[in-house]
Image (spheres, rainbow, N blue to C red):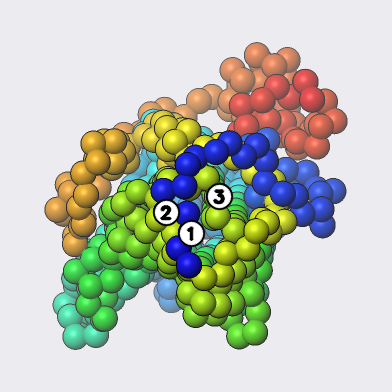
Amino acid sequence: MRLGAWIGAILVTVASVVSAQDAGRLAFPDAEGFGRFAEGGRGGAVLFVTNLDDYGAGDEDLIPGSLRAAVEAEGARTVVFRVSGTIELKRGLSIREPYITIAGQTAPGDGICIKNYGVGVRTHDVIVRHLRCRPGDEVGRRPEHAEKGWSTDALSLSGAARDVILDHCSTSWANDEVLSVSGEGITGVTVQWCIVSESLNASTHHKGSHGYGSLIRTNGAVTFHHNLYAFHRSRSPRPGTYGDGSILFDFRNNVMHAGGRGYSSDDPVRMNFVGNHHPTTPFSANPATTYYAEGNLGEITGDGAVPAPYPVAPVVTTTAGEARAAALKSVGAVLPARDAVDARVIDLVRKGIETRVDSAEEVGGWPMLHSAPAPADSDDDGMPDAWESRHALDPNAPDHNDDPDSDGYTNLEEFLNATDPKRP
C-alpha cells in the first residue's frame, strides 16, 4: 500500500497529548514534545565559559573557564558564555552529570561552535540551546587513523539519556550520523528547530561512504519537530528499536531537502509522520512499522498505516508549507547570530540545489566567529547589569535563582528566555 504520496497539506493545531508528564514546568516557554519538561540547571549555580580552550584525558589539568570544566562539574548548573568562537576539542565532550543548561545564546558576538569531536548527552535533565556542533574530518585524516578509519556524530544522545531537549542547535560535518538519539533506555526527548546538514559522505568512516542524517533508536518516546535535514546520503531520518521494545516517535513539521531517503528499521516502530515537507526525500516504512501519516508534502510508502495518530506530547503543528517557511527563517543557532555555514545551507535549500559533501574543506570550513566584550555583570549571576536594571532587579545582588513573579522560572531563566521576571 502506498500512502501519503503528495498528500495535500492540512492544518493540524496541536498534537495529541500524553498526560503522564503534564504536572511539570516547561524547560522554557517554547519547549514542546516529549522533552519539554527537562529541568536543566534551574535553581543551580552559574558557570561561565571565559575561554575557548580544551584539555585531554590523563595528565592534562582541568582548565578553569573552559566549556569542558563546566560540563564535567557536578550539581545543577547553567553554562553562560563570556566569549564567542570555535572550541577545538581534544576529545569527545560527554555530558554525564545531570541538571545542566548550556545557553549558547549568551555568547557575546557571533556565538559558539564545537570542532574536531562530537558532543554526547549521557544523562538526564539536559537543555542545550543555540550551540553549533561541526566536528569535521581533520582528526579522521590524521596518520594514526589511516588504516582503521575514524568516525563521529556531531551531537548525540546515548545510554539512558532522558528528559533532554535540544533547541535551535546547528549540526553538520560528521561522518557517522550528524545528530542521533540511540540507546535502549532513552526517553522523554525533544529535538526542535535544529539544523542537521551536510554529513560527510566519502570521508574517513571505516565502512566507506557514510553520509547519514539521524539514527533514532530507542524503546522510549522521542519528538522531532521543525528541524531541517539537508544534503545527506540517507537516514533522514532512520527510527528503530531495541529488542522487543517499540519506539514512540513523533516526527512533525520537519523539512527534508536532498536527504537521500528516510526509512524505518526492521524493528517495531510506532510513528506519527505529520506535516513534513520532503518532496526530494521519500520515506519508506518497513513492515514492522505502524505509522500515522497526515498533511505531508512528499512520498511515503509502507503497509502499516493506521487510521488515527498515536497519542503524543503536544506540539503546535502547521501545514507542511508553513513549516518550511518557518524553518528557513528560524531554524538552527540563530542567537546570537546565524553563521555563514547555516546561511549558505539555507540559501541552497531555498534555491532547490541538491549536493553532497565529502569534506568540510569543500564548503569553506569553519568561519571565523568573532567575539565581543561580555556585558557587565557586577554580581556574576549570569544576568547583565543593564537587563537587571531594566527589570527593576538589583545588579549588585546575586538573585539569579529568585522568582519574583512566582511563575516557576528563575530570574536567570527569564533572562535566557527573553521574558519579564516581574510578569508571569
- Residue at position x 58%, y 36% in the image: 11
Q: Residue furthest front?
A: 1
**Label 3 neighbourhood size at 10 Å, few (<14), some (14-19), many (20+)?**
many
Q: Secondary structure at mark 2?
A: loop
Whole-percent x, y for residue 150 in the image: 28, 76
**Label 2 neighbourhood size at 10 Å, few (<14), some (14-19), many (20+)?**
some
Left or right? Give the position of 101 relative to 342. Answer: right
Left or right? Give the position of 422 relative to 182. Answer: right
- In space, the residues marked 3 and 2 are separated at their CA atoms by 10 Å
Res. 133 in view:
no
Q: Between disc 1 and disc 3, whose residue precedes?
A: 1
Task: Choose top left, top right, bottom left or bottom right for residue 73.
Answer: bottom right
- Residue at position x 56%, y 70% in the image: 304
The reply to whether discs 1 and 2 touch (Cβ–Cβ < 8 Å) is yes
Whole-percent x, y for residue 24 in the image: 80, 48
Quadrant, the C terminus: top right
Q: Write down the residue under mark 1.
A: 3
Q: Nearer the viewer, residue 87 or 195?
A: 195
Q: Write down the residue under mark 2.
A: 5
Q: Write down the residue under mark 3.
A: 294
- Residue at position x 23%, y 73% in the image: 209
